Amino acid sequence: MKTIPILFLDNKEVHRDYNFVLDKPGQSLEIVVLAVLGENGWVFSKLNIHHKAPNTTSNTTVRAVLGSNSFLKLDGVIRVDEHCSNVQAELKERALLISDQAKVETIPSMEVLNNDVKVSHGASVSRLSEEQLFYLRSRGLTLQAASKLLTRGFIADAAGALKRPLQLKIEKKLDSIMGYA
């Protein structure tokens, strides 16, 4: 399965649309989107994953960590054409807000014109769990260390699909927006 990384790490306004077409039977695609945004990081993005052939697979994972006054608007769309049976597609969008001023708007959707498919989508937005922070602090970690551990754990599954130099870049950006750099 081919993996395509999409990173949003800059503290500036970005508008990007991505279109992926699976038009050959048996084609597989993994898309990993990671956004780590700090002050003045505003991202407006649309992901279109279009299945135009049968027996295709797509797996899209989105993880976003938003600090300061950052904003992420992400529209993810899975489309499956009428003649495309045996398609498997998943779109998972998760965001972690580490600032009261950070905002996210995530809209996963699907347009499926064939019944012989497995297609799913979902989105969640959360903050660091007070329970988890308390638990880690009761085990001797500082608030800073516990927050860092939970935040890195939040993006670990998505970042794990990337090459090590990209992982290091993401870790550095996380440290920066969390005030550890």
Image (cartoon, rainbow, N blue to C red):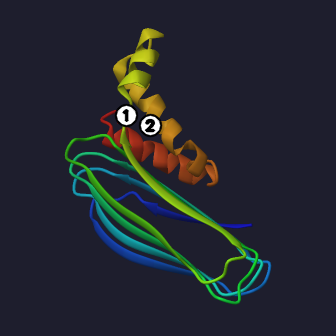
Q: Specify few, some or many for label 1: CA neighbours under 10 Å numbering under 14, 14-19, or 20 or more.
A: some
Q: In front here: 12 or 71?
A: 71
Which corner quadrant of the image does residue 145 belong to? Answer: top left
Where, quadrant-wise, is the N terminus in this rendering? bottom right
Which corner quadrant of the image does residue 178 belong to? Answer: top left
Marked residue nearer the N-terminal end (1 or 2): 1
Q: In front here: 175 or 121?
A: 121
Label 2: which residue? Answer: 151
Q: Calculate the distance from the C-alpha at mark 1 to the C-alpha at mark 2.
A: 8 Å
Q: Is residue 145 visible?
A: no
Is 133 drawn above or below residue 167 in the view shown? above
Question: Total marks drawn?
Answer: 2
Q: Are marks 1 and 2 in contact (CB under 8 Å)?
A: yes
Label 1: which residue? Answer: 128
Q: Specify few, some or many for label 2: CA neighbours under 10 Å numbering under 14, 14-19, or 20 or more.
A: many
* Residue under the point 76% across and 75% down: 86
* Residue type highlighted by circle 2: Thr
Q: Is residue 100 visible?
A: yes
Q: In front here: 113 or 65?
A: 113
Disc number placed over residue 164 in the picture, else none = none
* Residue type highlighted by circle 1: Leu
Element assignment for label 2:
helix
- Residue 77 in percent (x, y) is at 49, 74
- Residue 29 in percent (x, y) is at 67, 70
* Residue under the point 60% across and 46% down: 157
Give the left or right position of residue 177, taking residue 122 as reference: left
* Residue under the point 23% across and 46% down: 68
Element assignment for label 1:
loop
- Residue 70 in percent (x, y) is at 26, 54
Give the left or right position of residue 104, taking residue 3 as reference: left
